[in-house]
Amino acid sequence: MIKAVRGTRDLLPPETETWNRVEAAARDVFRAYGFHEIRTPVFEETQLFARGVGEETDIVAKEMYTWEDRGRAASEKGQSLTLRPENTAGVVRAYIEHKLWERPGLQKLYYMGPQFRRERPQKGRYRQFYQIGAEVIGPPSAGSESPARDAEVLEMLAALLDRLGIRDWTLELNSVGCAHDRPVYNEALRKALGENVARMCADCQRRAETNPLRVLDCKVPEDQPMIAKLPRMIDFLDDACRAHFAEVQAILHSLAVPFVINPRLVRGLDYYRKTAFEFTHGALGAQNAILGGGRYDGLSEALGGPKAPGIGFAIGEDRLVLSLQAAEAAATAPLDAYLAPLGPGMNKEAARLARELRAQNLVVELGDESFRLKKSLETASKLGARYAVIVGENEVAAGAFAVKELSTGTQVMVARADLAHALAARG
Ligand code: HAM
């Protein structure tokens, strides 16, 4: 049998309904904030990602699906192409290629679509995954450098998550500095790493030389105590970066958008300058970042374009849908018991019992005496009840009821006085 390739998956109904709902909500929110859709190709020249995302990042060094395309003639050398691992580089390439800076104001562009990274698959991490992202980019004269842009993007994200009903998110915020203060910080990092770096992993040893900031992104457990002691970028910010970061925070405070500062937040892409952020959600486990983003003020120039500061983010749609499913499961109250009146005249008894149990805060569904035992148990299972309680003439006379645990099939007799307690016990 031919199956979907490892790390890829089919999205089937009814789950696709949730995907459509998420995308529709995102489009509504983007419209209200003045964003328009851009669609760029799924593959690009490899160089774009090497220069844009950074040669030293895990994404470029280890995770890209790259191949050499056939040349037009047999003798012609092919071009190196790559399935996009992210979409910011593609959007900035399109901005430069189509001279979008000639259009008035800022370019506010959003996209939705698949991205490809050869990561180890696990829950919330796939090799083909989907992002919903947006970028605000333009000449400084249009206000692209302003901290107001950062705050606007963050507030929009909070509004989108709230609209979708995801409540318990955390916004983690950091500043990763800029072209002026980064070299000073890199030097401080190199000094702090010093001879200790010899005891760290091979990647860290190389990065300490080529791009020390990437050491902070190392996931090797043995290296973490060393990394925890390294200096923090926010202590090295120059005056302009510090003021920018303070203003972003001040606007967020005034908008009542909650956030925490995480000085250890380094993103897995090299283009970030100043503001960097992630929204996390507890229900997701290890892969808990629903979305990430930040400012990339030098990216356009690095790709051969004009000065065009920008800020953006990408939501991991797979993870957003997982968070929604967790939120929805939590919101639907579980059914504690299904009461099955058996035999004529038992509706009154069962109704009385249901009233007593509901008064004790148990979630109870009440059947009726027209059902036979088998049918009652089937209905109870279909409704997802934990227990079925059988209310028959003998039970009422004895003052004790047969309680069947539906997941195991175990049945015990429970005295009326103990019933609420027994049903409340979680197995
Ligand atoms: P990123 O942090 O690499 O940023 O990815 C953004 C989000 O995509 C992550 O927070 C996560 O939810 C999701 N994601 C990443 N890898 C996977 C995977 N293998 N499986 C499932 N979900 C995944 C970027 O891609 C930047 N382009 C964001 C950005 C836009 N920065 C500025 N503008």
Image (cartoon, rainbow, N blue to C red):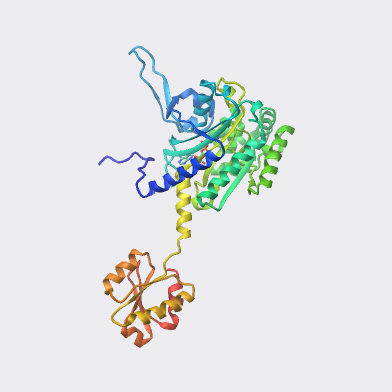
Q: Position of residue 63 (x, y in %)?
A: 45, 33
Q: Nearer the viewer, residue 213 or 98?
A: 98
Left or right: where 410 falls relative to 303: left
Above or below for 142 versus 353 = above
Q: Position of residue 362 (x, y in %)?
A: 46, 72
Q: Is residue 243 left or right of residue 23?
A: right
Q: Image height check: is 14 above or below 306?
A: below
- Residue 122 appears in the picture as rendered: no
Q: Nearer the viewer, residue 410 or 11?
A: 11
Q: Please state, as top left, top right, bottom left or bottom right, where the C terminus lies in the image.
A: bottom left
x, y (%) of residue 231?
Answer: 68, 39
In the figure, 210 relative to 126: above or below? above
Q: Quadrant of the rendered structure where residue 106 is?
A: top right
285 relative position to 271: left or right: left
Residue 223 falls in which quadrant of the image?
top right
- Most distant residue in the left direction: 1
Q: Residue at x 46, y 74 (%)?
A: 358
Tell me the residue at 49%/40% (across/down): 27
Quadrant placement of the N terminus:
top left
